[in-house]
Amino acid sequence: DGGITQSPKYLFRKEGQNVTLSCEQNLNHDAMYWYRQDPGQGLRLIYYSQIVNDFQKGDIAEGYSVSREKKESFPLTVTSAQKNPTAFYLCASSIGQGIDYGYTFGSGTRLTVV
Amino acid sequence: AQRVTQPEKLLSVFKGAPVELKCNYSYSGSPELFWYVQYSRQRLQLLLRHISRESIKGFTADLNKGETSFHLKKPFAQEEDSAMYYCALKAGANNLFFGTGTRLTVIP
């Protein structure tokens, strides 16, 4: 069953801690993305990666880091430098080239700083 | 800079009534536009793409370059259409810019 999996579904973090959100896909998609969803603000792009070992900053990359060591995986680390990390995080993937069939989204991770 | 505007945060219509969700964009290049939908407790998913000129679940959307709009329309709303709808603009190689979304409620 092909898809994109995000884990965990809920995550709680103490202030000052780094946390890593997992995103895995078995769709053989080249491109992967991380979005942050806040009420009333829609989705904002944090980072994206079009190929393995390469990634680019999106609109709100400050306080976040990513890696793309494998095609299937695109983990997002929320660092202590992120001033307002409480949000809903969405990972997505796309074929990356050729006909654009749009993005496939994961089910999201809700991060809460306590 | 690219921008997607969805002016209505909330939209309520009665079942069987026509519905139109507005989307305007700003982009200097050739736009590719999409509508995504998120039903309750489900993932965000693609509804339709302007390049395919398709009708999905009775919804259509026409790209109007003169008005820089990509409004989503359906002639007769159904209760199962109640959801959050996002308009998105593809700018650059593979980057989607999303609007802030419109929550559609269809009243029985």
Image: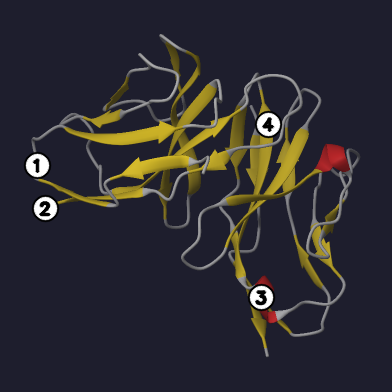
Circle number at residue B102:
none
Q: Give the alpha-carbon distance from disc 1 to disc 2, as whole Å.
A: 7 Å
Disc 3 marks a residue whose amino acid type is: Glu
Mark 1 vs mark 2: tell me if same chain.
yes
At a point 74% along the width and 47% down the height, the residue shown is B24
Q: Position of residue B62 (x, y in %)?
A: 88, 49
Identify the element where label 3 is drawn. Answer: helix
The image quadrant that residue A94 belongs to is: top right
The image quadrant that residue A99 belongs to is: top right
Identify the element where label 2 is drawn. Answer: loop
Chain designation of label 2: A
Determine which residue is flagged by label 1. Answer: A15
Determine which residue is flagged by label 3. Answer: B80
Determine which residue is flagged by label 2. Answer: A114
Identify the element where label 1 is drawn. Answer: loop
Determine which residue is flagged by label 4. Answer: B90
Q: Give the alpha-carbon distance from disc 4 to disc 3, as whole Å.
A: 27 Å
Please identify the residue farthest to the top as the structure is shown.
A53
The answer to whether the residue labelled 1 contacts the one labelled 2, judged by CB atoms less than 8 Å apart, is yes
Mark 4 vs mark 2: tell me if same chain.
no
